C-alpha cells in the first residue's frame, strides 16, 4: 500500500497503470491526516505486507513519515515500512518534470524504515547508509545483514575509489560496449552533462553499418531511462511544440542526424546554442477568435547524434564534440568475437543488465555542482589545432566533467568543486583523439581509410585501382567513391592513367606522417601536465599510469 500526503498526489499515481494494478493507495489529506478511520482500514487488511510513504520532500513531510511510522509500528509490528525519496517537492511536481516511468524506478529504490528514525536503502539500490538519531538501534544481526546485502553494489563507495574512470570504463565494457575505450568514456562524460547548467553534445561519425548508432544507443542505456528521449526522426516544427520544461534535464538521442530536414536542423542548432526556442504561434481565445501568442520551450539537455558527415554539422553546433567510430579490422574482430561469445552463452546477460543498472545508480548519486579549475589559465592547446577557440572551450568543459564525476573525491569550496591536476591529466587522455581530429584536415572516417590505404600500397610510387581497394577493404562502391573524391579534392591522391576495362589507376600524391603528428601533440599535452605538477610540487608518476 502507498500512502500519499495529498489527494492530488494519490490521483496522480492512480493514472499510472503499473501502480494502479499492483498497489493499493490511500491519501492522508495532509501531514496530520492519518486519522482513526484510515488506521482502521489499514488494520482490516489481513494480506497487507508493506506500507510505502510517498510524502512531500520538506520538513513537514519528513516529520509526518517519522510520526506515522511509529504509530503504524505499534499498531502492526510485522508490517514492513518504507519511504520513497522524490527528486522534486511532491508527486505532482515530479510528474510534471519527468516521465511516469520514474515512479516505477523510485518504488524499486525505496528505503526501508527499521525503527523510529532509521532509514536503510533497499538492497536493490546500491548505497549502504544507516542513519540512527536515537539511542534505540536495530540489532547487530539485522545491521550485518543489511551491510552484507548492499556491500557488493555500493554506488557511493564506487564513486569514492581512487581509479574511478578506469573502473567506470571497465564497467561500461561489462555493460556491452566493446572497444572504443576512450570514445565510450568521452561519450559518457558528455551525456551526464545534462545534470549541469551547460550540457555538452556529441556527433558520432562513421560510415554506414560502422556501429555509430549502436554506441550512442548503448551509452544512453546507461542513463536513468526516465531522462532519455530517443528519436529516429524529428520533423520541422516538433521541437517548438514541446511543453516549456519538457526538455529540461533530459538526454536526447538522434539515431540519424542526416535524415533531418534543414528547418529541423536549424531548430536543433538554436536549441543547443541558446537552450531555448521562442516562436510566435496562433491560438484561439475563449470566443474562438484567432490571436497571436508567444511560446517558449526551454531545453537544458545533452545529446548524442549519429551521422556520416560530422564536419558538416560540427561547424554549426556549439559545444558539440566530433568523434569517429573505430572502423579498423581489429575493432571489427573484437565485436565479432564478443557477438560469438554471447551467442555461445559465454556472456552472462544477467551480469550485463546488472552492470547497466549499477551505472544508472552511479548517475543518480551524482549531485549538481559548478566547477572551478584553478589551473585553467595555465592550459594551452597546440597551435596547429584548427578552430582553436572552440576546441579550447571544449577542453575546459571536459576537464570540468572529469572533476564532476570525481566529485566524491574533490574539495568543495563555497559550493564549488575544485579541479585537481589529476582531472586535467585524465581529461587530456580521454579527449586526445578529438584534439587530433581538430588538427587533421581529414575527418575521422576518411583518416582511417587513408591510413589503411597507405598501409596497403606500401609506398608513394605504387599504383592502385578502386576495385581492388574496395574488395580488399570490403566497403561499398558509394562509400569508396566518397573517400576517393574527398582525397582527390584535398590532393592526397591523384589519377595516374589507366587501361580500358581495367579501371582508372591512382597514386598517393601526399604521404603525410600522421603518427608523428599524433606523437608531437601527445608530447605537447603531457609536457604541459608535467609542468603543472612541477609547479605544484606533485610527485611525477610513471608514464603509463595516466592511462585510463
Image (cartoon, helix red, strand yellow):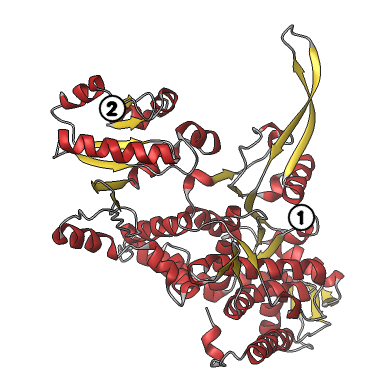
- Counting from the top left corner in percent of width and height, residue 349 is at 33, 58
Q: Position of residue 116 (x, y in %)?
A: 25, 46
Crowd tier of the residue under label 1, counting other residues whose Cα lies within 10 Å: few below 14, some 14–19, many 20 or above: many
Density class for disc 2 (Cα within 10 Å; few <14, some 14-19, many ≥20) is few
Residue at coordinates 43% horizontally, 36% vertically from top-left?
56
Q: Marks 1 and 2, Cα distance to the nearest angstrom?
A: 49 Å
State the image coordinates of residue 289 (x, y, percent, origin top left). 78, 9
Check if mark 1's residue and mark 2's residue have beta carbons within 8 Å. Answer: no
Q: Position of residue 87 (x, y in %)?
A: 47, 44
Answer with the quarter of the image where residue 46 lies.
top left
Q: Residue furthest top?
A: 287
Using the image, determine if residue 130 lies above or below residue 276: below
Between 321 and 365, which is closer to the camera in this rendering? Answer: 365
Horizontal placement of 153 versus 394: left or right?
left
Q: Which residue is mark 1?
A: 317
Which sits in the foreground, 512 or 199? Answer: 199
Mark with earlier residue (1, 2) = 2
Count of picture labels: 2
In the image, what residue occupies the spot 56% across and 57% down? 192
In the picture, measured across the screen, residue 497 lies left or right of residue 467, that is right
What kind of element bears circle 2?
A: loop
For label 2, the residue is: 24
Q: Residue at x 66, y 69 (%)?
A: 470
Amino acid at each position: 500500500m502507498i500512502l500519499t500526503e495529498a489527494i492530488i498526489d494519490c490521483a496522480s499515481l492512480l493514472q499510472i497503470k503499473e501502480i494502479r494494478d499492483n498497489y493499493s493507495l490511500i491519501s492522508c489529506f495532509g501531514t496530520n491526516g492519518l486519522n482513526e478511520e484510515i488506521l482502521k482500514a489499514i488494520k482490516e487488511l489481513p494480506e497487507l505486507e508493506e506500507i510505502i510513504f510517498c510524502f512531500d520532500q520538506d520538513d513537514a513531510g519528513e516529520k509526518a513519515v517519522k510520526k506515522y511510522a511509529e504509530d503504524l509500528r505499534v499498531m502492526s509490528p510485522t508490517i514492513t515500512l518504507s519511504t520513497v525519496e522524490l527528486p522534486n517537492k511532491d508527486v505532482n511536481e515530479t510528474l510534471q518534470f519527468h516521465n511516469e516511468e520514474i515512479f516505477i524506478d523510485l518504488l524499486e529504490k525505496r528505503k526501508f524504515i527499521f525503527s523510529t528514525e532509521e532509514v536503510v536503502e533497499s538492497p536493490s539500490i546500491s548505497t549502504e547508509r544507516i542513519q540512527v538519531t536515537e539511542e534505540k538501534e536495530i540489532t547487530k544481526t539485522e545491521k550485518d545483514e543489511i551491510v552484507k546485502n548492499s556491500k557488493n553494489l555500493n554506488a557511493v563507495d564506487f564513486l569514492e575509489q581512487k581509479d574511478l574512470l578506469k573502473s567506470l570504463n571497465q564497467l561500461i565494457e561489462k555493460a556491452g560496449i566493446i572497444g572504443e575505450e576512450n570514445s565510450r568514456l568521452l561519450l559518457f562524460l558528455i551525456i551526464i552533462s545534462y545534470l549541469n547548467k551547460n550540457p555538452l553534445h556529441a556527433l558520432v561519425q562513421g560510415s554506414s553499418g560502422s556501429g555509430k548508432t549502436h554506441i550512442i544507443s548503448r551509452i544512453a542505456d546507461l542513463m536513468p531511462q526516465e531522462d532519455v528521449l530517443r528519436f529516429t526522426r524529428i520533423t520541422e516544427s516538433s521541437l517548438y511544440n514541446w511543453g516549456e520544461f519538457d526538455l529540461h534535464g533530459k538526454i536526447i538521442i538522434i539515431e540519424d542526424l542526416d535524415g533531418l530536414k534543414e528547418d529541423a536542423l536549424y531548430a536543433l542548432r538554436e536549441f543547443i546554442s541558446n537552450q531555448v526556442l521562442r516562436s510566435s504561434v496562433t491560438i484561439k481565445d475563449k470566443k474562438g477568435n484567432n490571436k497571436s501568442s508567444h511560446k517558449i520551450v526551454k531545453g537544458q539537455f545533452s545529446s548524442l547524434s549519429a551521422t556520416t558527415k560530422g564536419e558538416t554539422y560540427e561547424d554549426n553546433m556549439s559545444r558539440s564534440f566530433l568523434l569517429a567510430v573505430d572502423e579498423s579490422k581489429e575493432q571489427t574482430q573484437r565485436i565479432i568475437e564478443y557477438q560469438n561469445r554471447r551467442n555461445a552463452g559465454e556472456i552472462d546477460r544477467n551480469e550485463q543488465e546488472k552492470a547497466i543498472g549499477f551505472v544508472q545508480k552511479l548517475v543518480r548519486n551524482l549531485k549538481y555542482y559548478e566547477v572551478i579549475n584553478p589551473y585553467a589559465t595555465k592550459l594551452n592547446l597546440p597551435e596547429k589545432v584548427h578552430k582553436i577557440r572552440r576546441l579550447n572551450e571544449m577542453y575546459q568543459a571536459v576537464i570540468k566533467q572529469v572533476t564532476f564525476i570525481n566529485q566524491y573525491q574533490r574539495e568543495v569550496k563555497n559550493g564549488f568543486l575544485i579541479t585537481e591536476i589529476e582531472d586535467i591529466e585524465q581529461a587530456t587522455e580521454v579527449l586526445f583523439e578529438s584534439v587530433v581530429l581538430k588538427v587533421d584536415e581529414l575527418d575521422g572516417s576518411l583518416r582511417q581509410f587513408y591510413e589503411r590505404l597507405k598501409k596497403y600500397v606500401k609506398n608513394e610510387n605504387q599504383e592502385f585501382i578502386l576495385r581492388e581497394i574496395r574488395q580488399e577493404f570490403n566497403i561499398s562502391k558509394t562509400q569508396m567513391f566518397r573517400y576517393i573524391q574527398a582525397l582527390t579534392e584535398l590532393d592526397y591522391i591523384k589519377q595516374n592513367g589507366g587501361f580500358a576495362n581495367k579501371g582508372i589507376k591512382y597514386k598517393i600524391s601526399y604521404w603525410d606522417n600522421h603518427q608523428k603528428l599524433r606523437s608531437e601533440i601527445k608530447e605537447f599535452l603531457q609536457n604541459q601536465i608535467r609542468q603543472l605538477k612541477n609547479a605544484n610540487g606533485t610527485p611525477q608518476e610513471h608514464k603509463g599510469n595516466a592511462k585510463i
